[in-house]
Amino acid sequence: MRIILTALMLAFATASFAQNDFISLDKQNYDYYLQGDYKNLKETGEKMIAQGIDYYFLRMRLGILAYNNQKYASAVTHFTKALELNSLDTISRGYIYSSYLLSGRVADANLYLGSLGEDEKNSALKSIKEPELLQIYLGTYITNSTTNNLNYKIVDNTTVIYAGIESYLSSRIKGTLAYTNFRKTGSITQSSALARNNLNTNQNQLYAKLTGYAFSGWEFSGFAHAGFYFEKTTSGQGNGNSQKQINGEYLGGIGIAKNGFKVRTGVNISYSNFGSSTQVRGEGYLTYLPFGNTNFYLTTGGMFQSDKQWGETYQVNQEIGCKVFKFLWLEAGIIKGNSFLYARNQGMVMSNSLLIPATTIYGNLHLMLGKQFMLTLSPYYNQNEIYFWDLTSNTRTDKLTYNAFAAAVKLTYKFK
């Protein structure tokens, strides 16, 4: 009997101690929440959860302050747990949607919204329409070359004008359509070895891509790009005779991407028929967002290509980006390689000329103009290589290097 009484007293004392410990930790945790002290809130919250103390309001506090501090991955984790503890909660679902959206995972935000019934949405989520037209953009890119080390021009200038549109075709399929006009003027002059080789080009390009979102975090895409141009060639005999030739070239490919809060990666393969040859290439990238948001990120990428006539070439690139103000992002990057007759960025960039951009250094300034307009300004430095190409015997000689400076402007309008 005495043993039973002793056990009951110990159990009562333990329960009383645990209750007092819970009250103390809960008060501490709530005070930190009211103060907006995320660091100490997180510490006490993790301590409580480790002791088996887990309840709806604790997860809501952790989720809200994680969200306010742009810790979107943690916010989604805590709000998801809050929903397990209270299935009638609609506030957490609103925060989960916004966490995906503000971390740059727009497709996952739309997928999450589409998975909810009307009774599971709060008033803010109910007011959001199904995604339709996403954005339209218009831009230009102008390059002006310098003289090379032999003191003569190779390419005078390049002008690119482009426009595009992105729109949802259904809740899980996004379409992209873009048009580009590419103009290049100039010729190799004052060289006894190369005589005169006309480089004037006027090319029209059309790009299309379909992106599917079957599962959260995953993207599957198919893309195609076609270029049509007149090419004027001038006789090397100096008799002034010239001819115009219509050329059409294309590429097609498929890709897959995985988007997380801190790591985003993707690969794609494509086939093209540039320059009276054929190419097969593989491309990949890895983006690391150390804070789980778009305030700071690093991207490493590369492309390896096998050309039927010209062999194997490559490009590698590195980019860093950061948010400076609420309305301003800055990016800087470098691209190096020996590729020509190539494509990058899931076929969006189509370079079907024999010009080799050995080194490209660039910057991007993204300026938000209100809630729906974004202006992008981009300076470039290019170190290009060019040869005298013999397309009959598939040989190249007389390597020349020249520098070019470029500037690009792009205006994007995002629909609400």
Image (tube, helix red, strand yellow):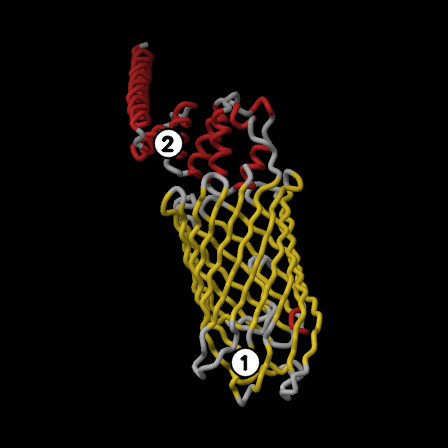
Q: Is residue 74 left or right of residue 397?
A: left
Residue at (58% x, 42% y) in the render: 134
Amino acid at dot 1: Ile
Q: Is residue 139 left or right of residue 324?
A: right
Q: Give the mark nearest the N terminus, 1 or 2.
A: 2
State how far apart marks 1 and 2 are (Cα).
Answer: 62 Å
Residue at (63% x, 61% y) in the render: 270
Among the 4 quarters of the image, the one containing residue 16 = top left
Closest to the observer, 91 or 349: 349
Question: Does residue 328 lie above or below 99 as drawn?
Answer: below
Question: Does residue 275 lie above or below 169 as drawn?
Answer: below
Q: Quadrant of the C terminus?
A: top right
Residue 41 image position (x, y, % from top left): 32, 30
Residue 369 image position (x, y, % from top left): 45, 43
Q: Which label sits in the foreground, 1 or 2?
A: 1
Q: Let me know if residue 261 appears in the view.
A: yes
Q: Secondary structure at mark 1?
A: strand
Please give the residue where the numbered disc 2 appears in the rendered image.
65
Closest to the observer, 390 or 12: 390
Amino acid at dot 2: Leu
Residue at (54% x, 67% y) in the render: 158
Please give the residue where the numbered disc 1 appears in the rendered image.
188
Q: Quadrant of the N terminus?
A: top left
Q: Let me know if residue 282 appears in the view.
A: no
Closest to the observer, 71 or 335: 335
Residue at (43% x, 58% y) in the render: 319
Say few, some or many: other residues with alpha carbon within 10 Å of mark 2 (under 14 / 14 to 19 / 20 or more).
many
Residue 389 image position (x, y, % from top left): 60, 81
